[in-house]
Amino acid sequence: MNKAVIGLQWGDEGKGKIVDYLSENFDLVTRYQGGNNAGHTVIVENITYKLNLIPSGVIRGKVCFLGQGIVLDPDHFIQEYKKITEKITDPRIYLSSNIPLILNYHKQLDRINESILTGESKIGTTSKGIGPAYQDKVGRKSIKLYDLTNPHSLKEKLSSIKKFYDPILKTFDEDLIDIDKNLELLNNFFIQVKNLIVDNNVIKKDYFNKKILFEGAQGALLDLDHGSYPFVTSSNTISSNISIGSGLQVNYETIGIFKAYATRVGNGPFPSELFDKIGDYIADKGVEFGTVTKRKRRCGWLDLVSLKYSCEINNVKELCITKVDVLNELDEIKICKSYEGKQFQDINFSDSAYLSNCKLNGSDFEIFPSWGNIDGMMNYDQLPQNLKNYVNFIEEYLNLPIKIVSLGPERNQTILR
């Protein structure tokens, strides 16, 4: 059965490690949304791999496919591809010919968009041009990979884009679009990647009836339509976007992945956020700094209210909990089980105002005693009973089995149940 690994929180759940772990048993690993605002860090035999666009299945030598649901920064992709080739011989990576590109004017527009917002209305974007690139896709102005095969048509497209965006760029004292410079950049990029570009039908034909693993980026609570809008990413992160974003119409089962606590980068509601030394401790112990942004992540207790919502909108069949080891040394561990006494079915998760202003109290949390050191434990039976009680509570609340328990960043620090 094909599988999809979907983040159930605000991203940074450890999807890269789990995709690497699972990909051994799959033929193709596919990314279907997002841009290089996503970041995966995978450690295998003391070698650290940092990936933004390329699926982590590449580490096991699997064929990797980037579908047209992503947006691709040419400069960044070339850098990432070169770094991978320094560690992996002849990686097999393919790009859908239908992928929209991120160009410099998208990054300029991203900065402009963020600059005109104030205070708590700021999104906290990475300013990598992701949002404006998706806006161009919807607005039918994208430069796509297949456009690079026709320089004359490409120049005409850039001329139209220049007419559209130059007045905005001029208003905000940004450099105007340089058509010749963009043509040169895109031509050089095409020369380097033309052998990686394929039509979706080629992938469909070659991997018909083979096993496919789908890798999500960001998390379900950042979904453009189902997250806490406007504090969301610019793509649909939930599993129902897989067929659209990959172009592969296949059946799959969803593995929902979440951390033993919660984190968020950027602004937006975070009901279980910690503002004390425990939050600082979790950030330091969990190395909670963005792979892409380098910003310290906001940290809080595990939130089962939003997690239940994420499981439902992603049709999750099984779960994976990660970074359990980060909480080892705490005297007590809490789980958020309600918002002001309300369960998930009583809450509109698109209502950012309510989510930002709700005040949790002691009755909204379940408290668990410390489970102590779990270093070196390799099977579930070895785990302390306090940790098993923690896992059991989550399973009962969500009515789903936790099949994978991750105890650290290394590939071998993973327990299958």
Image (cartoon, rainbow, N blue to C red):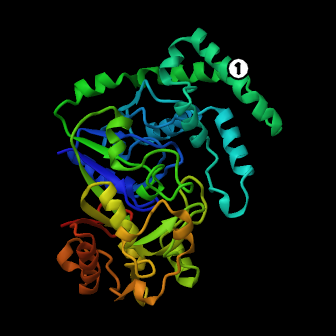
Q: Quadrant of the N terminus?
A: top left
> Vertical placement of 249 versus 317: above or below?
above
| Mark 1 surroundings within 10 Å by alpha-carbon count, few (fewer than 14), some (14 through 19), many (20 or more) | some
Q: Nearer the viewer, residue 1 or 238?
A: 238
Q: Please say if 249 is above or below 300.
A: above
Out of 356 and 298, give the one closest to the viewer.
356
Q: Furthest residue to the front?
A: 346
At 69% from the left and 50% from the top, the residue drawn is 114
Residue at image position (41%, 73%) is 303
Q: Position of residue 177 (x, y in %)?
A: 73, 26
Q: Which residue is mark 1?
A: 179
Is 160 in front, or is 289? 160
Image height of 24 relative to 62, above or below: below
| Residue 117 placement: quadrant | bottom right
Residue 26 rendering spot, x and y as whole percentages = 22, 43
Please report the residue visible at 64 percent of the width from the left and 14 percent of the height from the top: 155
| 379 is higher (above) or lower (below) than 159 | below
Q: Position of residue 139 (x, y in %)?
A: 56, 30
Q: Quadrant of residue 57?
A: top left
Residue furthest top in the image: 152
Give 243 or 71, whichever is nearer the viewer.
Answer: 243
Three-letter code for the amino acid on which mark 1 is drawn: Ile
The image position of residue 291, as x and y in percent, is 53, 55
Q: Is residue 154 left or right of residue 97?
A: right
Residue 183 visible here: yes
Q: Secondary structure at mark 1?
A: helix
Q: Quadrant of the C terminus?
A: bottom left
Quick check: 310 left or right of 250?
Answer: right
Q: Would residue 281 appear left or right of 220 to someone viewing this image? A: right
